[in-house]
Image (cartoon, grey):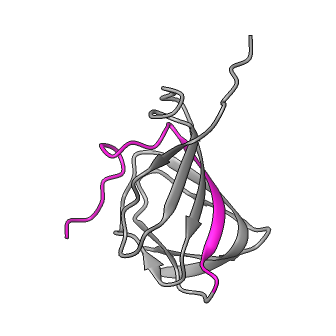
Amino acid sequence: MPTLIDKPTTIKAAGNKPKIIQEYVGRVNSETADVSVAHMRSPSGWIEPAQTPDFDEYTLVLRGSLRVEFDGGSMDVEVGQGVIAHRGEWVRYSTPGPEGAEYIAVCVPAFSPDTVNRDPG
């Protein structure tokens, strides 16, 4: 039988400004370790600590623009575009544009504070 996800769980976000993370599927809301699916809303000027995660992260931007810094450069992911941050790669996400960003993030395996491997400080 399919499992209905009645509503998401709001997860505390890392970063310099408040960001809304609503997890639909993942370790917290559905006790799913294989994959996580979250709806993110980040304000203008938000930046999170850099990380070298032990999961692949697939992101689809719905509104605004998401900046992804990586070893050797950065890219801006715009509305209707997606990006894959591969496990073991150093990345840092931010939303420097005036409208911030709204996006869907899918992590395989599911996001975990123990496997995100944030940079110290």
Q: Residue at x 74, y 17 (%)?
A: 2
Name the outermost residue toward the bottom.
Answer: 98
Name the outermost residue toward the right.
Answer: 80
Please identify the quadrant where the N terminus is shown. top right
Quarter location, residue 60: bottom right
Quarter location, residue 36: top right
* Magenta residues (range): 99-121
Is residue 68 left or right of 28 when viewed as pictured? Answer: right
Viewer-side residue, 102 vs 115: 102
- Give percent across and percent down for residue 110: 49, 38
- Give percent across and percent down for residue 82: 70, 63
Q: Residue at x 76, y 73 (%)?
A: 79
Q: Residue at x 37, y 58 (%)?
A: 52
Is residue 5 left or right of 109 when viewed as pictured? Answer: right
User: Does 36 appear above or below 11?
Assistant: above
User: Does 65 appear above or below 3?
Assistant: below
- Give percent across and percent down for residue 32: 52, 27
Name the outermost residue toward the left.
Answer: 121
Asked if the stretch drawn in magenta spans residue 113, the answer is yes
- Give percent across and percent down for residue 111: 45, 43
Q: Residue at x 56, y 49 (%)?
A: 22
User: Does 111 appear above or below 88?
Assistant: above
Question: Dominant secondary structure of the magenta stretch?
Answer: loop
Viewer-side residue, 83 vs 101: 101
Please identify the quadrant where the C terminus is shown. bottom left
Mark count: 0
Name the outermost residue toward the front.
Answer: 6
